[in-house]
Amino acid sequence: MRRACLPMLLLLPAIAAATVAPAKPVKPTHQTFAFPWPGSTQIALVGEEMVRKGSYVATSGAELATPATIGSTVLSAGYYPKTAEDTQYHYHSYRTRENRMGYGFITIGRGSLGGVAEAPTAIRISKSSGEACLMRDGGGKIACSRGLPFRQVQREELTEKDLQQKLFYAGREGRSIILRYWEDSGHFARKQRIREYRFPANFPREIEVEGARLVVLEANQTSIRYRLIENFPVEWTRERTARIGG
């Protein structure tokens, strides 16, 4: 009997260690993108991107489609960033008031004794059952609820250091081709900007829009064929204008 119990006793520390393993922090990652490759020839249809360049922060989180209640605490609809994860649960943060970024915020209700209920340190969502719990320091649960419409998603966010620039083909009218420039940033002083540019429809022609240089080879009402010389510059300047090559 002792021989049979020995292997089980040896396994107990390993099982306990796995059970109490701390959640692994989840950190946003910074991503950059650029298209197309300089020197390459491309074809874009009306409404499609011709040139793009920029950066963003990729985050993970839970999207709540409609407001929900856990105990006496009301969770708004919105995005709840994921801060940590283990084998059983996702852990999410929240905001305390409505915000322009669309983050989920909570409104704390009354506790059992009539005072303000305890503020949670995190929202924990079970990977298997979907149960959502408001957690306190030390891992204790304040309240839990099942069946909430949380959905785990990926989200791209712009910080104050991020800028995205895109150039679209908007078609041809008579002897002119139309390009539409779009840019956006997370910086409060850089508002989203959309601007339309028109160029003579005689080809081939080198053009420049906001620092991006390309050669238009041919274009009609439905598509454009072009070769990229240089993508948008790294530095953003509002004074840049469109220029037509000689």
Image (cartoon, grey):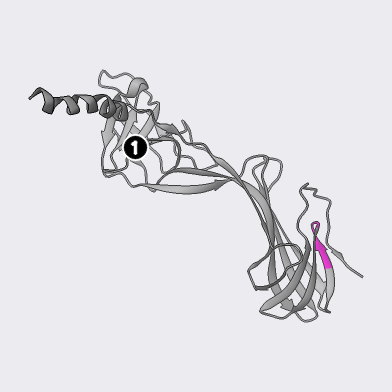
Task: Please provide percent x and percent y for residue 47.
Answer: 63, 69
Horizontally, residue 29 falls left or right of residue 160, namely left
Does the magenta portion include 208? yes
Q: Which of 88 and 69 is in front in this view?
A: 88
The residue sitting at 34% across, 37% down in the picture is 89
The residue sitting at 38% across, 24% down in the picture is 119
Q: Which of 21 and 166 is in front in this view?
A: 21
Task: Please provide percent x and percent y for residue 105.
Answer: 44, 35
Q: Residue most toward the front?
A: 3
Identify residue for label 1.
89
Residue 117 appears in the rendering: no
Task: Please provide percent x and percent y for residue 3.
Answer: 12, 25
Chief secondary structure of the magenta portion: strand
Task: Please provide percent x and percent y for residue 152.
Answer: 40, 47
Does the magenta portion include 12? no
In magenta, the rendered stretch is 207-211
The residue sitting at 76% across, 74% down in the picture is 177
- Three-letter residue code for mark 1: Tyr
The C terminus appears in which quarter of the rendering? Answer: bottom right
